[in-house]
Structures are given as C-alpha cells and as structure tokens.
Amino acid sequence: MSHLADQKKKSEKGSRLLNKGGFTKLIGSIREEFATENYSNNSRVTVLQALLRLKLADESILNDTVRLIKMDKMSNVNQLTNVLYVLAKFKWHSGDYIDVAIERFAKEPKLEPRIACRNLWNLFALGHKSEAGLKLFADVIQNSDPSKLNVLDLANSLRAFAHF
C-alpha cells in the first residue's frame, strides 16, 4: 500500500499525497474484503500499520477493526495489542471495544509482561480508564521477572498509572 504513495509530494500536514488511481482502487478492494474471511488477522494488522505509516485514518477500515474486536475475532494477544496501538495512534474512540479487548486479555492463561506494558500505553493514549485493565496489567507486571521488561515498557507503564 505504501508504495502507491507519491514519494516526492507531501501535504501540508507532512503525510504523503497518494497516487490517486492505483491507491483508490487498492483501498476500495481492501475496504470490501477487510472484515471477511479472505483476510487473516496478520493481514489486517499489516494493513492497519500501513495506514498508520501513511497517516490515513480510513473510517471504514477502522470501524471494521473495532467491530472485529467487539466480536472477539482478534484472539491472538500480540495482534490485538498491535491493533490497539494503531487505534490509539489514530485516537479512534468508537464504543466499548477497549473493554472487550481487556476481557480478551483477561482470558489469556499467561499474559506476557511486555504485552501488559504496551497495553497500559494503549489505555493511556486512548484516555480510557479501565479499572479491570489497570489491575490485570499491574498484576502481570508485579508477578513477572523484571529483567524481561525494557526501559520503554517500564516508562510507558509508569506514565499510564500516573495518568489514571
């Protein structure tokens, strides 16, 4: 998707201007298929990351993403964390999808501390205070080996706790 952007021209906000013909056709195809069985969650994450790089908050695709989260179609916690990151970067507030995601994390038998820290940042970036999420992620961090956490993960966690 990114290769369809014009590398030389930039808009006033700094995002690349898009090659209209090829990109419009591609994004239309993605919109049609994004929430279907034709796309794997890995493919969806890739599309969302490309949209983020392009600074293009496509309403249709982001709303489909929220709907998939609400339907518990994002069962892999790494993928879900990456999807929440993209939604957080776009400041995409649309319903109670964050609480559904927290419920999914709570079902995970062994949540990694790295995932907990990154999702604390997601909560912070979305400005979504979730008592259940804060408790879940704090418990994971408290019961983990501190050597498995990097400085950025710790800083993001502290920032989220301080914020809430």
Image (spheres, rainbow, N blue to C red):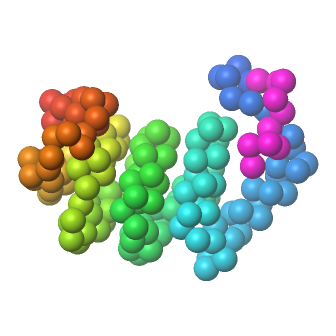
User: 148 or 83, which is in the foreground?
Assistant: 148
Question: Does the magenta-highlighted stretch encompass residue 4?
Answer: yes
User: 50 or 144, which is in the foreground?
Assistant: 144
Name the residue located 25 percent from the left edge and 69 percent from the top edge: 108
Name the residue located 9 percent from the left edge and 47 percent from the top edge: 142
Question: Does 155 appear above or below 135?
Answer: above
Q: Residue 159 at what x, y percent from top left? A: 22, 30
Looking at the rendered structure, the number of numbered marks drawn on it comes to 0
Quarter of the picture holding the C terminus: top left
Q: Can residue 92 be seen in this view?
A: no
Bounds of the magenta segment: 1-10
Name the residue located 32 percent from the left edge and 44 percent from the top edge: 118
Q: In which quarter of the image is residue 111?
A: bottom left
From the image, give the main secondary structure of the stretch colored magenta. strand
User: In the image, is 13 to the left or to the right of 96?
Assistant: right
User: In the image, is 75 to the left or to the right of 32?
Assistant: left
Question: Does 22 appear above or below 9?
Answer: below
